[in-house]
Image (cartoon, helix red, strand yellow):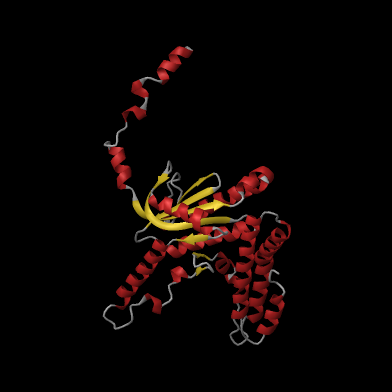
Amino acid sequence: MTEDEFVYDLFDDEKLPYKQLSVHDEENAEIKDSINLSCVAFIDILGFKEMIKNDIDKVILALRYIKLFRESYCRLPSTGYVGELQNFLPEATMFSDSIVLSHTIDFDFDFYAFVTALAELQITLLREGITVRGGVEIGNLYHDDCFVFGDGLVSAYLLEKDTAKYPRIVVGEKLFAEVERQFDKGLERRFENKGVSKNWRDYENIALSFISTDRDGVKYINYFRYGFSELNTFDMKNVFWDEQIDSAERFYSDTVKPIAEIIKSKLATEKDEGVMEKYMWLKTAFNEMLNIYINRSHGGKSARYKRLWADRFIE
């Protein structure tokens, strides 16, 4: 085939599929029908441009962690995953330094699982000195292995861009209200005709266990609360107390100490005021959560335990 014949063949009208598309065709209608109310998270790796320039190894490591996260916690649109947990897993799409997660708001949607997966990702990356920021909200969304679009994605992106500011994933007001509504609805079914209060505020909403309100009034996924939960120690008449202390010490060495060292190092060397502000936020969040877990411990040996941890705050 000559070059002229190749070009002619390439641009043959009958072979150009986009020439045949229409807003009224069957595929257009199918895609439109597949737009659903969804929980959508938009997450961005902070400092990615600088890492590209100065630390390509860290870039590759971050992307590998996110790839592993997708394979472990998500239903990838391109894989056709068919396991018993398929309906409970969010779908995921990754591009450059961003990842989009979504799950249709339906019977199988588990907000607690959605949040804990994101918290796990944040703690894991922070342990490697990689911080992320994002937003999670509800809205209409279409999500497959080719593209993802909808006002839900726009809302999540705007939360990341305009509200998150620090290394945190912000929870949108509409999503928070929906989680409350679903919890209240569950209580109504559970306690119907039993004369028991149906106000969700009277009961612990487990789905919101790791959602905190920051000092600026913004609700976010408290990944320190999730990540440091293994520091909980309780003395039930000295039963297993020493084992709990040993477990907490191992967790401190493996997870808490590396994060503290990273934050300290950045605060000591960072020149950029914007980056410094983000690490000051991390320092405050770290110390606040460490203080909570230390003061939760109780029992005959708790005083020694608290003294041991008193020197582990970030100055």
Residue 89, image x, y percentages: 44, 56
| Rendered view: 22 above or below 164 | above
Q: Is residue 20 left or right of residue 306?
A: left
Residue 244: % across, % down:
63, 76
**Quadrant holding the C terminus:** bottom right
Locate residue 106, reporting x and y percent: 34, 59
> In this view of the protein, which residue sits in the foreground, 137 or 303?
137
Residue at image x 42%, y 50%? Answer: 154
| 285, 124: nearer the viewer | 285
Residue 129 visible to an observer of this rendering: no
In the image, is 39 to the left or to the right of 45? left
Indicate the quadrant where residue 231 lies.
bottom right
- In this rendering, the answer to whether 128 lies above or below 230 is above
Residue 268 showing in the rendered view: yes
Asked which quadrant contains residue 53, the reply is top right
Residue sitting at the far front:
273
Task: Please tell me which residue is depicted at 47% across the width and 12% down the height of the picture.
Answer: 2
Q: Nearer the viewer, residue 53 or 104?
A: 53
Count numbered badges in the picture: 0
Image height of 228 relative to 197, above or below: above
Q: Residue at left 37%, top 19%?
A: 12
Query: What percent of the width, then of the height, locates residue 312?
Result: 70, 72
